[in-house]
Amino acid sequence: MTELESVASIEGVSAAVLGDLEGTFLGALRTNDGETIAAEMGFVGSSFLQIGELLGLGPLATLAISCRAKACLLVVRPQSLITAVIAPSQSLGPVERAVHNAIQEWT
Amino acid sequence: MPNVPAPNDPKSQGPMDLSRLVGLKLGNYRLERIIGRGRMGVVYLAQDEALLRPTAIKVLAWASTETRGQDPVQWFLGEARLVARINDPRVVQIYGAAKQGEYCYIAMEYVAGTSTEALLARDGRLAPETATDILVQAASALHAAHVAGVVHRDVKPGNLLVGPGGITKLGDFGMALGSAGVPVGNASVRAGTPFYTAPEIWRGAVANGASDIYALGATYFHLLTGRPPFVGPDLAAVERAHLSEPLPDPRLLVPGLPASCAALVTRALAKNPAERQPTAQILMWEGRRALQELAAASHAVHAATPALTPVPAAARPPPPRPVVPRPAPAALAERFGFTQAPFGPFDPLLAPFQAGPLDVVRRQLRTLLEGPASALVALTGPPGSGRSTLLRQLAADLGASGNRLVLSADGAGRDDGRTALQRICRAAGVPDEGATRIDGLLHRLGEERGRPVPVLLIDGPDEPGAVPADLASLVSAGLWSGTFKLVVTGPVGLSGQLIPERPPNQADRISELVVPPLDADQVTQYLRSWFKATRAPDAAAIHLSADAMLLLAHRSGGRPGKVDTLAWNMLALAAGVGRPTLTSWHAWAAGAEVPWLDAVPPEATSLPPLEWPTPEARRLLDQCRKTAGLPPWPDGKRP
C-alpha cells in the first residue's frame, strides 16, 4: 500500500491527492479532479509556507482548512504535498490524527 | 511713365541690351530691376500685378541661342516644361512661359536671398555645417529632377539660391536635358561651367545624373574650401585637371575640416562615375549623415554647456496613443473579479511585459537601439510572438523622456491601406504624397540635430513576402543618412528581406532580434502578470495547473498572441462553472482561433468528460510532461 493509498483508506477521507508546492499533479485516489485539487492546494501550501516563514514559525508541516463545503488536510513532505479531502460532515480532529499516523508510518 | 524701350528688333540685341527693359510689362508682370544675368538671358525682379507677388522674369537673350541654331521659343518652352515636370520645393518653380511681341520670357518663383556664388564672394568659404546643409538641399532638388527625367547640366554655385531660413533652391534649368522626348537644349553641346564639369563630359559623353552629382560635388568643394577643385591658367589646364589630376585634399586646404565632409566630397568627385554616389538621393542621405556627425561633434565640444532644452510639446508629433483598455465581459468581471479585459492591446506602460517574460528581449532591444552605429533593428518572430507589443512598449519607453522624436506607424496597411511611409510622414507633419516625401521626412527629422537621433517604429508585415518599396526606401534612407534609427517588426529573416545585400560598411548597423517563444513557466508568469494588471486587488486567486500551462505553451507555440486567445477562452470555460482554476482540460478544450467574447460556443461544454484526460489528450500531456522533466500523467483509481 502506498502512502497515498494509506491516506485515502482512512475513514472520513473522501479523496487523496499527491502534488507539490508548484501545484503539479502527481497522483490522486477517489477523485477525478486531482489536477484541480493539486493546483489549488499547491497555491495554498506555498502561500502558507511564506506566512509561516514570515511569522518565524519555521517550515510549514501541516495545514487544516475547514469550510462549509469542504475540509482539507495538507501535509507537506520534503518533495511533495499530500491533500486529504474530508467530507464536511466529518469531524476533522480524528481524521487529522489518523492521517498523521498513516504518514508517520512512511517516514 | 516707365522707361519702356522702343520696340527694337530683339534679334539684334545681345544680353546686355536686355538691361533696358525696366518698366516694361510682359503679361501680368511689370519688370522692376535686374537681379541676374545668365548665359541664356537676363533675369528681372518683376511684380505680378494680378497676384500681387514678386516674380522673377527671365527674358531670353536671343543672340545666345540663335548662335546655336536653336529656335528660342522652343528652347524657353522646353526649359519651362522640364521644370514644370519636377515639381519640387527645392527647385525654383516656373509659373509660365510666353512670348510677347519679340520678347520670350519665363516667369519664375522669386527667391528672396542670394546665390551661393555671392556668399562665396562675400565670405570666402562657408562653414562645413552651412555648406553641407546647402549640399543636402541641392541634392534633394537634383534627385527630384533626375526622378523626373531631367539632367540639369549646369550645377554650380551661381545656380544655388539661398533664401530666408537657409532654404536652398536649385535654379536655371536653361541647359537642362530632358528624357522622354522633351525637346530642349542641345545634347551634343558641352554644357556646364568648366570648374564643375565632370571628366566624362570633357571626353564628350552625354550628361547624365552622375555628371550632375560630380558638378554638385565640385560646388560643395568650392563652398567648403573657397575654391573650385581644379583651377588653372586656361581652359585646357582645367580640363586636364578634371580628367587626370588627383583631387586636392580638402583637409589640407581647410585644416580642421571634418573627415565626414572630406569623404563626402571625395566620393562625389570620383573620376569614374561608377565610384560616385549612385544617386543624388544617396548623396543627400550621406550629406545628412555628415550633418548628423557634425552636430554630434559640435555637441561633444560643447559638452559643458547646459542640457538641451526639451522639444516643445507643441512642436512634436503626438506620442503613440496608448491603447484604451477594454471593459471586462460580465462573466469574467462577476466570476473572477476582472476590472478590465485581459490580454491583447493594452497600455504598454502598464502591461505585463513591464517585468514580464519578454523583458529580456525588451532590454536587448534598447541596448541595440542605443548603440551609436545602429541604424536598423528588425524585431522578428511569428505573428503573435509579442513583437508588436514590444514595439508599442518601446514607443512608450522612448517617448517617455520627451526629448527624443519617436514616430510610430502600422506598416502593413492593416487599417486604411496607407503605407508605412505615408503614416510616418503624416506623423511627422510632412506631405505624405509625391516622389520626394522621403526627402521631406529627412528634412523634418534633420531638424532634430543636437537631440537624440529620432526613432521610427514600424509594425511591419505579418508574413514573409515582398517588402513594400517605400519601406525598403525608408530603410535605405535611414542607413545612408543616419538621420534616424528604424525598428521594424516582421517575420524571422526580415532584415535580409529589407537589405538583401548588406553594404560592407553598413553590416554592423543592421541587427535582427528574434523574439523567442515563451516556455511554460513564462506562460504562467505572463498570465499571472495579466491577471494582476486587470483584476481587482482583492479578487480571489485564479489557480493555474502546471499541466494547463504545459498544454497552453504547447498549443500556442509560446506566442503571446496565441496564448491570449487560448487563455481568454480557458477563462470563458472556467467562468461557466465559476471555479477559478484553469486545468489541462481548459487548455485542451479552449478554441485557439478567435476569442469567445460573450459566450462559450455550444460545442465547447463547460465540464470535462468524466474520464479525463482522454487517450488522445493524455498522449499529448505525457509528451509535454516528459519535455518538462515530469513523470507521466498519474494513474489513479477513480471513485
Image (cartoon, rainbow, N blue to C red):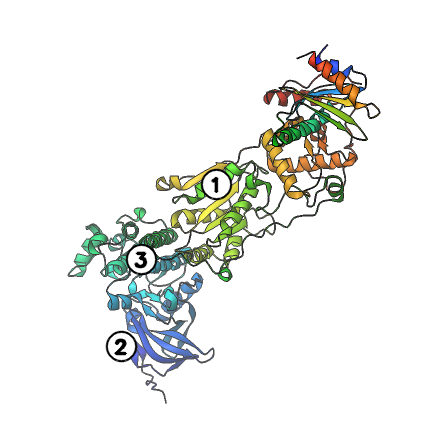
Residue position for label 3: B216
State which tag comes first along the sequence, 1 or 2. Answer: 2
Q: Horizontal and vertical percent for residue B122?
A: 25, 69
Query: A94 or B288: nearer the eye?
Result: A94
Vertical side of A12 occupied by B429: above or below: below
Residue B103, x across and y down, in percent: 36, 77
Write down the residue under mark 2: B16
CB-based contact (under 8 Å), mark 1 and mark 2: no
The residue under label 3 is which amino acid type? Leu
Mark 1 / mark 3, whichever is N-terminal: 3
Q: Position of residue B75 (x, y in %)?
A: 36, 67
Chain designation of label 2:
B
Disc 1: host chain: B
Which residue type does callout 1 highlight? Leu
**Are the residues under badges 1 and 2 in a single subunit?**
yes
Structural crowding at the residue carrying mark 2, measured as other residues with C-alpha within 10 Å and reported as few (<14), some (14–19) or many (≥20): few
Q: Secondary structure at mark 1?
A: helix
Residue B154, position in %: x, y? 31, 61
What residue did someone put label 1 on? B365
